[in-house]
Each structure stands twice: as structure tokens, then as C-alpha cells.
């Protein structure tokens, strides 16, 4: 049994999983993962249609926001050697290297306090949350809510390659000053299904969907006894 599965099962003995009643408080939790492609996402036990949609959405956003450099050497220097390719407009841009997926979920305050109470050095709260979120994804009534952004390679201070979003780099002070056309660092796109009826992502079975930039991501609704609160 995978660790996330065992975490989920052990939690069920400790934390109430009943749907919240009126007046219950809620705690938003999230699972933050980076994948090179949809198959890696599926291997991590995320729903297949969610992984496919997230990958496609991130690639589309990459096409819209990627920085453009006059010289390939300048582009490679801003990312890593060999990361860049020439576009149809003759500028150079980094290739799409994958996507960062932030799966959003919510539990009752009582459930969350239970998670905190059983967390330890051997079983960190982050692993408990991962088990809970993955467990919810296995439920047929799961309503997907997530944010996704493309990632690009960069070397850390130790010279190790890692994948980061453009907004992460910008927040650390990188202005992409050598780019002829700097990127749009509003790189996150948010997605939420609108109904609990499952019919696939974005259509079918009475299921509606919407995707939009995180700057517009602010609304709240109720579904199946849970309060979903979206923050941008």
C-alpha cells in the first residue's frame, strides 16, 4: 500500500469524516506538486482527466506568457543551457518543461485540528494533508478545484536544476531584464467545476467548468454540505 493511502486510512480512525453541518468552520488545504507531463501526474494518483486538463492548460498559458530573447545564448543564460528554442517569430524562448499543480480542498475545522493533533516528525502534517487530498480525489463525488502554471528549468545556488514558475522567479527579484519581450508573470490559471454531477472536465453530464487567471479567482459557493471558498 502506498504511504499516502496508509496515511489516509490511519486518519480515518482519528479524524471525523462526516459532512459538515450548519455553523461548522472550515479550513482550506492544498496539495502542491510539479510534474513534467500528464503521465507523472496520473502516477501520483491524481485523476487522469484532471492531469490531462492541467497539462493542456499549462501549455496554453506557456504559449501566451513565455519570454522572448533575441539571442539563444541570452535565453539559455536566463534558464539553463539547452533550454531554449527558436519560435516562429524568430525570437528564442524556453521550452515548456512541465507544470505546477496546486490542488485545492477543504475540510472541517474539527477534521483539520485532528490532523494537526496526530502530526509528528515521523508523520508531518504535509504528508497527512497529501493523504487526505488524494483520498478525496478517489471519491466519485470529488469536485476538482485547482490552480496550474507552467514551469521552466533554472539552477539553484548549489548548481542543481529545478523547475520553477515565472511568478516564483519574479517574486525572488528576477525581472528577466535581458529579454526583448519579458514574460507575463501572471502565469497561474485557476479551474473549478461548477456542479457535483460528474460528466468529465468541462462538459457532459450536466457538469460545467470555468478557467480564468488567478487575479480573478475570488468567489464562494456551497456544494454537498461543504463551503468552497476561493482566494486569489
Image (spheres, grey):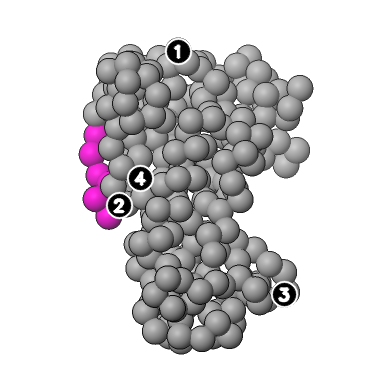
Residue 216, percent across and down? 24, 50
Q: Which mark is residue 18?
A: 1
At which x and y percent is residue 102? Answer: 48, 44
Give coordinates of residue 9: x percent, y percent: 66, 18
Q: Is residue 25 above or below residue 231?
A: above
Apparent side of residue 21 relative to residue 90 in the rendered image (left or right): left
Queried whether the magenta region covers residue 218, the answer comes back as yes
The magenta stretch is: 215-220
Q: Secondary structure at mark 1?
A: loop
Residue at mark 2: 213
Query: For residue 188: magenta?
Result: no
Q: Which residue is mark 4?
A: 190
Q: Is residue 92 visible?
A: yes
Disc 4 on helix, strand or loop?
Answer: strand
Give the CA distance from mark 4 to mark 2: 6 Å
Identified at 35% across, 40% down, the residue is: 191
Disc 1 vs disc 2: which is toward the camera? 2
Q: Quadrant of the N terminus?
A: top right
What residue would you read off at disc 3? 159
Amino acid at each position: 500500500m502506498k504511504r499516502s493511502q496508509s496515511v489516509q486510512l490511519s486518519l480515518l480512525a482519528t479524524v471525523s469524516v462526516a459532512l459538515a453541518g450548519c455553523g461548522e468552520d472550515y479550513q482550506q488545504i492544498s496539495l502542491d506538486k510539479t510534474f513534467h507531463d500528464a503521465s507523472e501526474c496520473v502516477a501520483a494518483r491524481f485523476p487522469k482527466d484532471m492531469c490531462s486538463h492541467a497539462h493542456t492548460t499549462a501549455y496554453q498559458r506557456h504559449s501566451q506568457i513565455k519570454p522572448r530573447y533575441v539571442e539563444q545564448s541570452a535565453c539559455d543564460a536566463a534558464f539553463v543551457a539547452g533550454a531554449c528554442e527558436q519560435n516562429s517569430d524568430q525570437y528564442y524562448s524556453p521550452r515548456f518543461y512541465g507544470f505546477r499543480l496546486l490542488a485545492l480542498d477543504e475540510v472541517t475545522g474539527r477534521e483539520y485540528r485532528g490532523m494537526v493533533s496526530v502530526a509528528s516528525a515521523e508523520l508531518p502534517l504535509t504528508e497527512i494533508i497529501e493523504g487526505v487530498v488524494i483520498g478525496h480525489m478517489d471519491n466519485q463525488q470529488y469536485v476538482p478545484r485547482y490552480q496550474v502554471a507552467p514551469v521552466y528549468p533554472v539552477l539553484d545556488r548549489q548548481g542543481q536544476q529545478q523547475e520553477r514558475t515565472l511568478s516564483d522567479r519574479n517574486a525572488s527579484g528576477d525581472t528577466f531584464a535581458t529579454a526583448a519581450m519579458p514574460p507575463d508573470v501572471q502565469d497561474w490559471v485557476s479551474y473549478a467545476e461548477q456542479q457535483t454531477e460528474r460528466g468529465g472536465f468541462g462538459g457532459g453530464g450536466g457538469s460545467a467548468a470555468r478557467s480564468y487567471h488567478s487575479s480573478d479567482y475570488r468567489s464562494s459557493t456551497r456544494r454537498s454540505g461543504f463551503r468552497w471558498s476561493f482566494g486569489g
